[in-house]
Amino acid sequence: MNIIIGSDHAGYDLKEECKSYLQKIGIHRVTDIGAFNRESIDYPRIAHQVAAAVEKGEYERGILVCGTGIGMSMTANRHAGVRAALCLDLYSARMSRLHNDANILALGGRVLGVGLALEILEVFLKTPFEGGRHKPRIDQIEC
């Protein structure tokens, strides 16, 4: 699986943990587009880059991390074909994939501990889209 990952300064530390985890479990390709340190950076720029790459089909999934995950998810969801899900618990991560076919995971670096965030990431990556009755609903998301 090809994954693109990005964060702002508030999500930098958690992004680095997620990137290390992805490399450890053998994800085929992880592309990190920044932030590359804790210096202030505007989250919309990063969110748009990740979402555009997922929108174009260059990556199967994306991961975005900011302080709360809210701004990243709001920005990413402005892109056609992007279904960014802010997940702060395992159930939401599972359902975002199972029923909503989310293709971008948004995490909050200031609201999640590393352990839980990595569990959420694992569930997000391993859960398939159920399809069936959910597919027509997904189709209705696009305007």
Image: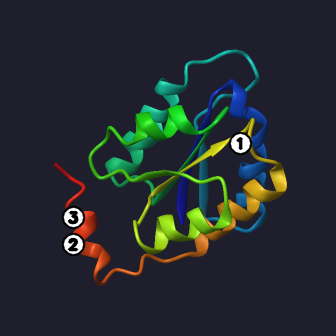
Q: Is residue 53 above or below residue 139?
A: above
| Crowd rating for badge 1 (residues with CA inside 10 Å; few <14, some 14–19, many 20+) | many
Q: Is residue 112 left or right of residue 53?
A: right
Residue 20: where, in percent of width, then height?
A: 78, 52
The quarter in which the N terminus is drawn is: bottom right
Q: How many marks?
A: 3
Q: Nearer the viewer, mark 3 or mark 1?
A: 3
Q: Where's residue 122, x and y in %?
A: 68, 67
Image point (63%, 28%), residue name: 8
* Residue labelled with disc 1: 15
Q: Which residue is mark 3?
A: 139
Is residue 10 shown above or below 21? above
Callout 3 touching callout 1 (CB < 8 Å): no
- Give me the residue at 74% from left, 64% from top: 119
Residue lying farthest to the left in this orientation: 143
The reply to whether dot 2 and dot 3 touch (C-beta < 8 Å) is yes
The amino acid type, in three-letter code, at marker 2 is Pro
Give above or below for 45 relative to 105. Answer: above
**Marks 3/1: CA distance?**
30 Å
Marks 2/3: CA–CA distance: 5 Å
> Helix, strand or loop at disc 2?
helix
**Rendered location of residue 15, percent (x, y):** 71, 42
Q: Residue at image x 78%, y 58%? A: 116
* Residue 68 lies in quadrant: top right
What residue does disc 2 label?
136
Q: Which mark is residue 32?
A: none
Query: Amino acid under label 3?
Result: Asp
Amino acid, disc 1: Lys
Viewer-side residue, 57 vs 94: 94
136 sits left or right of 55 in the view: left
- Is disc 1 placed on a helix, strand or loop? helix
